[in-house]
Structure formats: C-alpha cells, structure tokens
Image (cartoon, rainbow, N blue to C red):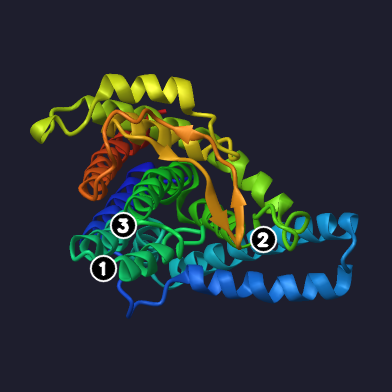
Amino acid sequence: MIDRVELLAVIALGFLLDQVLGDPHWLYHPVRLIGTYISFLEKGIRKIFGDGERALLAGGVVLVLFVTGTTAVVSGGILYACGRISPGLKFLVSVILCYQLFAVRSLKDESMKVYRELKKDDLPAARYAVSMIVGRDTERLDMTGVTKAAVETVAENTSDGVAAPLFYMTLGGPVLGWIYKAVNTMDSMVGYKNDKYLYLGRAAAKLDDLLNFIPARLCACVMIFASYLPSKDHEFDGSHAKEIFLRDRFNHASPNSAQTESVCAGSLRIRLAGDAWYFGKLVKKKYIGDDLRPVEIEDIPRANKLLYRTSWILMGLCAVVEMVLNLL
C-alpha cells in the first residue's frame, strides 16, 4: 500500500531539488549507468542473435525485458534495503531518485548555453552546444536552424523530461518512474529508423511511444493553459497554441513529439521542424506551426519560460491527484 502523502512529499522535494541543483557534472547520474548497460547488452545480443531481421526484432524484445527488469529490481531493491535499515533513509533515497528523474533545470541550463553562444555570434560554438541536446546533425545548421533545434528540444522534453516521469512517479513512485526513464533512454540510444537500429530498436521505440502517449497529450494541454496566462510583452498566444496543436500535433514521425512542439510553435507564433539531417542523411519532415514571424534567439528563453510554467502546473496537478488518491 503506497502512502500517498509521503509519496507526494518525496516527489515535491525531488522536484524542488531539481529546480535548485539541476544536473551538476560532479554528480554521477544513474542514466549513464543505464546507458552503459544498454550498450553492453546490445553487443551481446548482436553476437548471440545475429543480423537477421527476425533475430534482431527478437533481440530487441530481449533488450527491453532485461533493461526494464534490471531497473525495476535494482531501484526497488535499493529502496527495500534502505527501508530495512531506516524509514528515514528510505525517504531520503526516494527523494534523490525522484530528483534525478526530473530534467527541468538541466534542460534550461543546456539550452541557455546555446543561447549565450548565439548572443556572441559564435555559430560553431552554438552548433556544438546544441549538438549536446539534439540527435540531428548540427554542422549544417545556420543561426536560425540552431535556434529552432534548441526550442524544439525544450518543447519536446517538457514532456519526456518532466511530464512523463512525473506521471509515472505519481502512479507508482520512483521505481515506476525509473522504469519509464530506462525505456526512454533505450529509445534515445537504439530507437532510430536507420540501418543499424531499424529492427533491434523497434521494441524500445514502440514501448516508448506507448508510455509517452498519455503524458505527451496531458503535457500539451497543460502547456496550452500555461500559454493563456498573462505574460510580459504578450510573449505567449494561448489561442494560437490551441489552434496549431489541433492542426499540427501529428506532423511528426513520432505520435508524441509534435504534441508539445505544436503547442510551443503556436504559443510563440513561429514555425518549427522541417527537413533535418540525421547521420549524414537528409530526412524530410513536415513543418509545425505558422511562419508568422522570424525565429529569433530570444525564443530560446521564451521556450524555457513556457517549460517552467508547464512544470509547476504539472507539479500542482500531481499534488491534487495524490491528495485525492489518499482520500480513496
């Protein structure tokens, strides 16, 4: 039986820690360990299963089962062991595990590195900074392309890095949150539709799509609401955010990515997405939003303001849900 009041306290403290600390480089993040484990398993699976289409599809399922199973056992085991030692220790470790699931502050910090390089007109440095937070090739991007890439990743990761982890923590605590994070990490590593990962990464990609289905749409709705709130110099347009969401929310190969991207594009009254280079190949992609004004570097801090508004509203919704569940 989950103590909902205690879980709310754990999630809220983790959320606040993320707001204050972000992802400092001196603190080892468990996602790195998960990534290393995925790479290790990938090598073994390719060696055992071979290169055939069906073999790699089966290997991909094995990869998902091993990564999610191990994540559940390790995170659950850590909390169980801590609880045997002291309830206070379990509470503290739970807060740390929840804190490391959030990516609000780090998303802002990394995207603002891009902004600062653009402000200095240092395009090579800006390309390098944005390459740290996007999966596309960045060496061909101009100033506008770099700006769009940064805005798009802030918009998309408002769901992946905030809404989805919070959704699963609210339902099942830090263990379920880390199972989601493991799947999301797999998708970011092997979920590509290229020659190398088309079959091996399919199971991870499909599971990630499934797990993000509700959080992405919830996040988009909250982001629309956040766009209606008063803002300095009318930075956000709630009506246009809703209009573009309804029109362009499926203008992406992923069923979830354009949900929040469309809201952000509409809210800022700009056009995002379009063709992009991945692993040296040009990928044709639909546009999201209307070209009502040119994209400018100030759109990066604006996207971050929308990120923070949305994150705090989502945290408020989490509190309401936990209190209601506590009464049931």
Residue corresponding to mark 2: 69
Task: Describe residue 192's horizontal placement relative to residue 217 as left or right.
Answer: right
In this view, the mark in front (1 or 2): 1
Q: Position of residue 19 (x, y in %)?
A: 23, 57
Residue located 52% across and 45% down the image: 275
Q: Hey, which quadrant is residue 120 in on the image?
A: bottom left
In the image, farthest residue toward the left: 232
Q: Position of residue 52 (x, y in %)?
A: 90, 61
Q: Hey, which quadrant is residue 60 in on the image?
A: bottom right
In the image, farthest residue toward the bottom: 26
Task: Describe residue 36's horizontal placement relative to residue 326 as left or right.
Answer: right
Neighbor class of circle 3 (other Cα within 10 Å; few <14, some 14-19, many 20+) is many
Residue 179 visible here:
no
Seen from the viewer's position, the closer of residues 150 and 220 is 150
Amino acid of disc 2: Gly
* Labels 1 & 2 near each other (Cβ < 8 A): no
Residue corresponding to mark 3: 14
